[in-house]
Image (cartoon, rainbow, N blue to C red):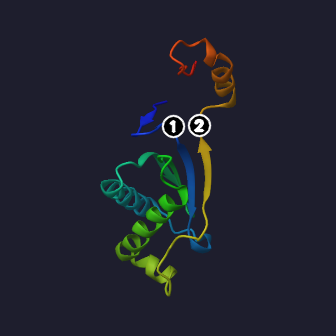
Amino acid sequence: MEFKKQTNAIYYCDYHLVITTKYRKKVINQGLFEYFKIKLKEIRKYYPYLEIKECNHNQDHIHILISIPPKVSVGSVVRIIKSNTANKLKSKFDFLKQAYWGTESIWSKGYFVSTVGINQRIIENYIKNQTKEDSGQAKLDLG
């Protein structure tokens, strides 16, 4: 586990995102997924504070493990990912134009998100033992 630093915050904010295809159509094959990962890396050029840690897929959805700083909303990151991949995927893969004619997006409106953080036991120990540290900033015992 690696903590990240900003000017006014030290954080560990990892999220499990799941974005699904519109109408849950089973359109994601290995070639499309590989191209999606390329486009995901390109997004990082413009949003370097995002860290994609893992990414995988099923035929109708994509899982992403991503680190997002606390100053950025999860919803805005999902919007960035969806909007920056949908048109590029449709222009690269003709079958998507047929599957989703009359609509710009290939992604459903919703998404799933779950935090992936430090477990409850570690937080409880941190709070119990914080007064034992000299500096007032106790370190988390991750072991």
The front one of 126 and 41 is 126
Name the residue beneath numbered marker 2.
Answer: 117
The front one of 95 and 111 is 111
Give the amino acid at mark 1.
Tyr
Q: Which mark is residue 107?
A: none
109 relative to 140, above or below: below
Residue depicted at 61% across the width and 45% down the height: 115
Judge whether residue 62 can be spotted in this image.
no
Residue depicted at 37% across the width and 71% down the height: 88
In the rendered image, which quarter is residue 20 located in?
A: bottom right
User: Judging from the image, what secondary structure is the residue with disc 2 in?
Assistant: loop
Specify which label sits upstream in the sequence, 2 or 1.
Answer: 1
Judge whether residue 136 can be spotted in this image.
yes
135 relative to 17, above or below: above
Q: Answer with left or right where residue 14 lies relative to residue 30.
A: right
Name the residue beneath numbered marker 1.
Answer: 12
